[in-house]
Amino acid sequence: MARTALITGASSGIGREIARELYARGFRCILCARREDRLRELADELGENTRVIVCDVSKKEDCYRLYDEVKDENVGVLINGAGFGLFGKFCETELERELEMIDTNITAVHILTKLFVKDFAQKDRGYIMNIASSAGLMSGGPYMSTYYASKAYVADLTSAVARELQEAGSRVHVCALCPGPVDTEFNQVAGCSFGVKAISAEQCAKDAIKGMFGGKTIIVPSAALKLAAVGSRLMPRKLLVAMTGKVQSKKGEA
Ligand SMILES: NC(=O)c1ccc[n+]([C@@H]2O[C@H](COP(=O)([O-])OP(=O)(O)OC[C@H]3O[C@@H](n4cnc5c(N)ncnc54)[C@H](OP(=O)(O)O)[C@@H]3O)[C@@H](O)[C@H]2O)c1
């Protein structure tokens, strides 16, 4: 039976390109998102063995249903790619939208990681990639505060689970993808624009999959961003947040 990969957020951007990359490496793909037409289009491209599951991961019951529907399908790779951002001052942004973000970016990732890592640990094989962001490595991001905090959760949870697995001698690999700006529908959804040049979703996906199968825990595509991520760790937290805020504030100007 072909190895199977489950990809949430497969209807667009990074998730869609990761699905293409995994398919090219011989994986059967299960594609998940809310926009069925987009998923079917990709499934047609990838071939008839591809499965589509329409699912709103901001709803806990949809996450549990997704797991139940695929748990007997030999899933060996889980990509938690569904997510979104929101630009604006914390005292002005809409609470309900932020709670939806927390449900999508944090709770869904937590539930699916928990359910699959248990199965994978029992079989002593499997890969989980949680798409965090370089935002998750920055100690806070003014004007996108909830988004940055949600990605810090994902990066920290993933690092800790990865360490537990390593200490147990497990062959299950868990990693976090932490890209900087990537050219996708992200900005359109978040209501902002990037101040710096973005990499393509295709490039991001290639680096991500190479990093995951290469055994990396935190994957930062692009050399310049890797350097920035290392540099940021040496900076006092207050200064780092102030600098991030300066960059962030420009995102609303376009
Ligand atoms: N683009 C960047 O610069 C960047 C940088 C760092 C990290 N990231 C992260 O990368 C991930 C993918 O984003 P992207 O840049 O590829 O943006 P995108 O093009 O907007 O794609 C987002 C994907 O998430 C899915 N999604 C959103 N809410 C969902 C929900 N409730 N249930 C199911 N699926 C949902 C969307 O599908 P439907 O709308 O069809 O449901 C879509 O497939 C996100 O976690 C994002 O935070 C992006």
Image (cartoon, rainbow, N blue to C red):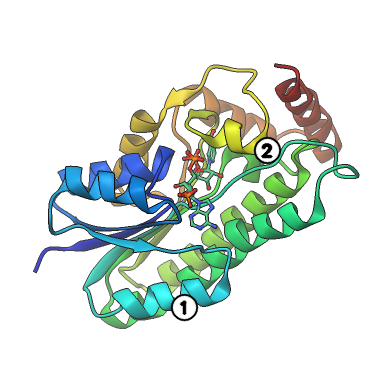
Amino acid identity at mark 1: Tyr
Above or below for 160 versus 85: below
Residue positioned most to the front: 37
Above or below for 110 versus 248: below
Residue 169 or residue 19, whichever sits in front: 19
Amino acid identity at mark 2: Arg
In which quarter of the view is residue 124 placed?
A: bottom left
Q: Earlier in the sequence, mark 2 or mark 1?
A: 1
State the CA–CA distance, disc 2 to disc 1: 37 Å
Tell me, for residue 64, which label it has, or none.
Answer: 1
Q: Is residue 185 left or right of residue 65?
A: right
Tell me, for residue 166, which label it has, or none.
Answer: none
Above or below for 114 versus 195: below
Residue that mark 2 sits on:
233
- How many numbered circles does the render carry? 2
The residue at the point 47 percent across, 78 percent down is: 64
Q: Position of residue 111 (x, y in %)?
A: 52, 72
**Can I make out residue 117 in this image?**
no
Q: Secondary structure at mark 2?
A: helix
Quadrant in the picture for the N terminus:
bottom left
**Can I make out residue 174 in this image?**
yes
In which quarter of the view is residue 148 placed?
A: top right
In which quarter of the view is residue 120 placed?
A: bottom left
Q: Secondary structure at mark 1?
A: helix
Quadrant in the picture for the C terminus:
top right
Q: Residues within 10 Å of mark 1 (few under 14, many from 20)?
A: some
Q: Is residue 171 left or right of residue 23?
A: right
The answer to whether the residue labelled 2 contacts the one labelled 1, judged by CB atoms less than 8 Å apart, is no
- The label nearer to you, 2 versus 1, is 1
Residue 178 or residue 172, whichever sits in front: 178
